[in-house]
Amino acid sequence: MLERNLQSVANHLILSLAVADLLVACLVMPLGAVYEVSKEWRLGADLCDMWTSSDVLCCTASILHLVAIALDRYWAVTDIDYAHQRTARRIGYMIIIIWTLSVLVSIAPLLGWKDPEWETRVYQDLQCIVSQDIGYQIFATASSFYVPLLVILFLYWRIFLAARKRIRRRQQVRSFSTFKCRETTTAFTNVSSANTSPEKGSLGNGIERDRIEIDPPTADISMAYPSGNQASCSSSRPPGSSGLASRKKTQSSTDSKRERKAAKTLAIITGAFVCCWLPFFIIAILLPTCTSCDISPLITSVCLWLGYFNSTLNPIIYTIFSPEFRHAFKRILCGRRYSLRRTRNLGVRHMR
């Protein structure tokens, strides 16, 4: 709301995710902390219903937002026209679907989908946990985690493949353009040595023809001819000069770093999500289905709060890694001093 450059359509998903995580902190974690300290539930059945439903609602919404963000990124990477199709209405529909599904999952126990021992646990055992009905647990865990997990893994794997393919395609097109630059330089040298007019040689038409012959869907011409390669075509250095080889080696190293960075970023996103929520949802499905399993309450609590910790990581993963969000946070937290220092640094870079 404070930074105009962050008020894009895609960031509406980030905003809705932030609301879901904030609700986890406001509605779920305080009562959860009281329950952990007291080791028993003395707040009544109604408040237990409200707390468990809020827990399921907010955590499910948080997880489904991660699916929506992955889907939005997948469309942005694989569909060239998606930038024009990403409208506020489309993102709004995605947000509405997320919260609607979350409400449906969380409201089912309030409508009566509970196990027969639920009241006994609340009034006699003084325990407040979500409905342990086997059917509901399979429905809830599948909707809240297992299906979203499979979708996220699939989408980010396809995003990684698309990013790696694009980076390697640039390398291939760059190598092709470098070869043509050498071929053109040789032809120009032969034409000049024969005292022939350059217009009759292959310098002009050869480059234009080579550019047209590159398949447009598989090669972006603006990316295929970076400034370094353009300079190599117009340079008077010999084709085998050390400068060209150095530039080619540097560009190859840069592309490799980009590929590693893409893999690292996607690994952090999926790894944090899986590590935080997988232990809890394994226990959630074991409690009603495995009667012989003796799961320690301490392990259950640790896994539950590890899932809550994912709401702490989301602002770091989905905002701090973005330069725009980092600069916005610094401007908000550090005020005018950071803005002046950043403006001065940008001016010095521009002068250089």
Image (spheres, helix red, strand yellow):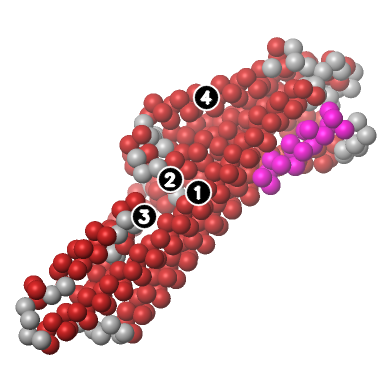
* Mark 2 or 4, nearer chain start: 2
The answer to whether residue 220 of the structure is visible from this angle is no
Amino acid type of disc 2? Thr
Give the secondary structure at mark 4. Answer: helix
The residue wearing badge 1 is 159
Q: Secondary structure at mark 3?
A: helix
List the residue tagged with mark 2: 78
Question: Foreground mark, 3 or 2?
Answer: 3
Amino acid tagged 3: Thr
Disc marking residue 290: none
Q: Is the residue 108 above or below the residue 182 in the image? A: above
Magenta extent: 274-290
Tell me whether circle 3 and circle 1 mark residues in contact (CB < 8 Å): no
Separation of residues labelled 3 and 1 (CA atoms): 17 Å
Mark nearest the camera among 2 and 4 is 2
Q: Residue lying farthest right?
A: 292
- Relative to 143, 167 lies left or right: left
Disc nearer the start of the sequence (4/1): 4
Cβ atoms under marks 3 and 2 closer than 8 Å: no
